[in-house]
Image (tube, rainbow, N blue to C red):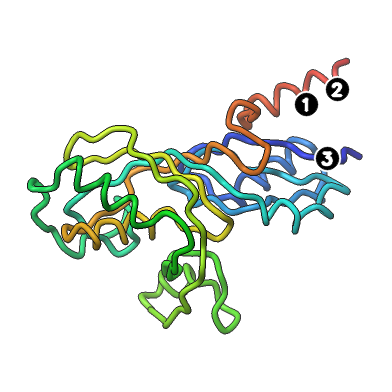
């Protein structure tokens, strides 16, 4: 039996559970879990804990994380990303790069963040995204998270590309939505790539196809 850690570069369109299921088929073992959910829209670092490595779950869950992401100004959606239904379109052409830089500064440090309805946390035993699929919205308690870095990478209105370093429990889509609210024009996430979980970087990650090829080669050897 294999024990340890596998750093996967999750593709868009798959849930974190989908990745775990694929890894179980590739490695032919059941004792595999992931440390830190990524939405289907998101790509990047997903840490898989294998065999006895699953005992490290709490340690890995607590790691800080880093992301590269893009938001779209002027659009609010039901899921705070481009895959949701549009709630509102707002003027955004007046927003300047300086406006964005100044707004980003306001989010550095300890902030209060309300988990989005499409998150995986549970309220009264039900995951929020399960309720959201049924059109049910429930009250959520704001939680304290920490933003260590929020840097503008590129601005071509209405798209804003940024780099984020944050504590566990931070929702990138909610941050984008809150930035849009602070700017007064609304915003939603267009793409998210997780580039780091604790010491594990995107450069360390393998694709599922690469994992499959490596495992097949090990069987041949």
Disc 2 and disc 3 in contact, CB within 8 angstroms: no
Which of the pair 129/148 is nearer the observer?
A: 148
Residue positioned 42% across, 82% down in the render: 139
Q: Is residue 152 left or right of residue 98?
A: right
Give the CA distance from mark 3 to mark 1: 14 Å
Q: Secondary structure at mark 2?
A: helix
Q: Secondary structure at mark 1?
A: helix
Residue 53, position in %: x, y? 83, 47
Q: Which mark lies nearer to you, 3 or 1?
A: 3
Residue positioned 28% across, 32% down in the render: 154
**Image quadrant assignment for residue 156:** top left
Quarter of the image that includes the N terminus? top right
Query: How many badges with numbers are in the image?
Result: 3
Residue positioned 33% across, 59% down in the render: 80
* Disc 3 target residue: 4
Question: Around disc 3, counting alpha carbons within 10 Å, would you say few (fewer than 14), some (14 to 19), or many (20 or more)?
Answer: some
Which of the pair 1/144 is nearer the observer?
A: 144
Give the CA distance from mark 2 to mark 1: 6 Å
* Disc 2 target residue: 219
Quarter of the image that includes the C terminus? top right
* Disc 1 target residue: 215
Q: Is residue 42 left or right of residue 188?
A: right
Disc 2 and disc 1 in contact, CB within 8 angstroms: yes
Residue 39, position in %: x, y? 49, 52
């Amino acid at each position: 039996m294999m024990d340890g850690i596998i750093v996967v570069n999750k593709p868009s369109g798959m849930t974190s559970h989908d990745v775990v299921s694929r890894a179980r088929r590739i490695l032919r073992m059941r004792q595999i879990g992931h440390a830190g959910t990524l939405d289907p829209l998101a790509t990047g670092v997903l840490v898989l804990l294998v065999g006895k490595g699953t005992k490290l779950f709490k340690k890995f869950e607590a790691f800080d994380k880093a992301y590269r992401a893009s938001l779209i100004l002027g659009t609010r959606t039901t899921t705070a990303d481009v895959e949701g239904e549009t709630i509102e379109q707002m003027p955004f052409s007046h927003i300047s790069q300086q406006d964005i830089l100044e707004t980003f500064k306001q989010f550095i440090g300890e902030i209060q963040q309300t988990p989005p309805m499409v998150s995986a946390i549970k309220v009264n035993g039900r995951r929020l995204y399960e309720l959201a699929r049924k059109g049910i919205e429930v009250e959520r308690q704001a939680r304290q998270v920490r933003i260590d870095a929020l840097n503008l990478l590129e601005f071509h209105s209405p798209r804003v590309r940024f780099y984020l370093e944050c504590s566990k429990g931070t929702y990138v889509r909610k941050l984008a939505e809150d930035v849009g609210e602070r700017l007064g024009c609304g915003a939603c996430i267009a793409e998210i790539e997780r580039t780091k979980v604790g010491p594990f970087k995107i450069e360390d990650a393998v694709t599922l196809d690469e994992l499959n090829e490596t495992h097949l080669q090990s069987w041949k050897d």
